[in-house]
Image (cartoon, coloured by chain):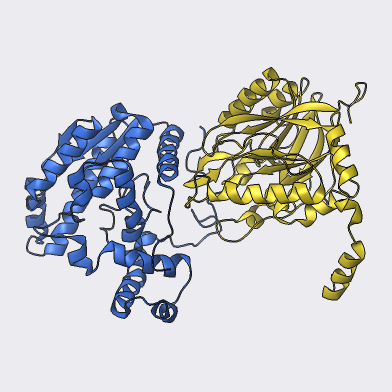
Amino acid sequence: MRDLPAVHLPLLAEVLQQFLAGELAASGLAGYVVGLSGGIDSAVSATLAVRAVGATRVIAMALPGPTSDPRSLADAEEVASWLGVPLELRDLSQPAAQLAAVLGCGDDRLRFGNLLARLRMTALFDRARPVPALVLGTSNKSEILLGYSTLFGDSAASVQPLGDVWKTQVFALAEYLDLPQRVRSKPPTADLWPGQTDAGELGFDYRDADPILWAHHEAGLDTGQLLAAGFDPPLVRHVLALYRRNRFKWRPTVVARVSSSAINIDRILPRNPEP
Amino acid sequence: MSTGTPVPDDFLVALAQIATRPGQPRYNLQRHLHAISQARAAGAKLVIFPELSLSGYLLNHGVGEAALAFDDPLLEPILAASRELTILIGLPLLEPGGGISNAAVLCEGGRVCGVHRKLYLPTYGMFDEGRFFVAGRRLEPLSCALGTFGVLICEDAWHLSSSVFLSHPPVDAVVVMAGGPSEVEEGAVPAGARRWHWIVGAMATTSVTPVFFANRCGWEEGVLFGGGSWAVDARGASLVEPAPACEETVLLAPFSRPAVAWARTLIPIPRLERFELWRHALEKVGA
């Protein structure tokens, strides 16, 4: 109970690759566009995509902002080089600063971080359009459950291969896929402002939070049962508070149903029908 | 039942483990024709496809778009191919009086010769079949030139009473057409296939009947299907190595009528079923 159940990494990688190949084939599009942040999630996602559809059908982009750590770009370059895909650099510093000035949010770290995340989303979808390509999401299950993402920013994508994969398992996948050591060992960060780390913002490490999330979300243990199982009480309360508070992000848009044919309520239809 | 030719005692059964796409029936048809061609080339007399093989599984309200009647042009190439071997496919069947069944359709000699409508429609967890299909009302074996088969569609097989019913009188073999979603766990075999192998083995050994299990593989709408198609004989011995989890495969397994008869001579379990216990249990719960 105190550890995540083990997962067979070769099989996990194989089925996720098949998912990516299948989604691309079913869409009829030409490839994937992925933003490489220099972090582990985007590196694992891009690696799975390259293994699934080949390096020639994966476009990697680096999208630094004015407050990005230069080391992140170097890490992204290392991942792209390791994967054998060119890295397209689009510096978002100037447009981010200009838009922040127009909106008056430059002094608000969180608003500016969200703005940059959404600019990255804009760049990725814009790059995907002429290919045409799908945008490869890089969110993992832990951060989705915790709501640790920018709505319509880094959470926006065509497909999310890691969306049901715990962060602890992403670490393990990175080992299995033999990603560059630097990417495997650096602390997770959204890199939206200097010194930002996931653990610093969330107040805990994913490896500590994941067993709690698993025991609650998958195994159905309530707070009392989690405490009885020996989990740290403040951590349990903190994790479960995020789990509840940010749940709206799991389903970001709600349609007001006023007919008997509301989309995705009364009419849930296959995404990729034949013409 | 087709006429004229003697019922063969031994023949090859092909399990067509394919990856279908919901909303893409023409693509799915091509996967069928490809697998049928492989099965025919290998000498199979019967080819079995997974649940809802022609339409894909995760249709939701798309069932309405995908439902077919027997005169649908999409079926014509399959019926034509059934002049050379017997074909069992899955599709959403438009019922004449309204409603759509999750159906197994047996094609032989250029025509439909039998239909089984799924009895148990899972409506829990990720499943929502009760919302989109009407349940079948009878479990009756399907007969064709090759013999008599008990056909179960996915959840039908999770109710082990099904294989008991199909043992009285005994069918030649049980066929399971599955669209079994799966998870990834510690083992190298997907969780779905692992569970299915338990069910298939238990069904074969307790009913002393060979079981031919055709599952689908691949992904639909973000859901993984676990493959692992397999066949076991009437004593529970593997007739062929299970198909891999992720690959489209045409798996070939032998059927032997004399072997079934010999197994049933040695092991009388189905004949010893004590239906008075069932009757008592039914009376007790008021069913």
Image: A186 above or below B2: below
Residue B271 relative to residue A80: left or right? right
Task: Identify the chain drawn in yellow.
Answer: B
Q: Position of residue A190 (x, y in %)?
A: 19, 55
- Residue B201 vs residue B156, the one in the foreground: B201
Q: Image check: A131 left or right of B211?
A: left
**Residue located 86% across and 52% down the image:** B269
Residue depicted at 36% across the width and 72% down the height: A244
Establish if A148 lies above or below B215. below
From the viewer's perspective, is residue B176 above or below residue B79?
A: below
Percent across and percent down for residue A143 are: 31, 60
For the question of whether residue A38 can be seen, the reply is: no
Residue A83 seen by the camera: yes
Tell which residue pokes out farthest to the top in this image.
B41
State the residue in front, B252 or A90. Answer: B252
Give the chain letter for blue: A
Extreme residue in the front direction: B266
Q: Would residue B36 appear left or right of A27 to someone viewing this image?
A: right
Q: Nearer the viewer, residue B202 or A242?
A: B202
What residue appears at the point 69 percent right and 27 percent down from the top-left corner?
A: B73
Q: Could you say which is closer to the camera, residue B151 or residue B106?
A: B151
Give x and y (percent) for residue B145.
86, 28
| Left-right relation of B98 to A202 | right
- The answer to whether residue A202 is above or below residue A118 is below
Q: Quadrant of residue A177?
A: top left
Quadrant into which the C terminus of chain B falls: bottom right
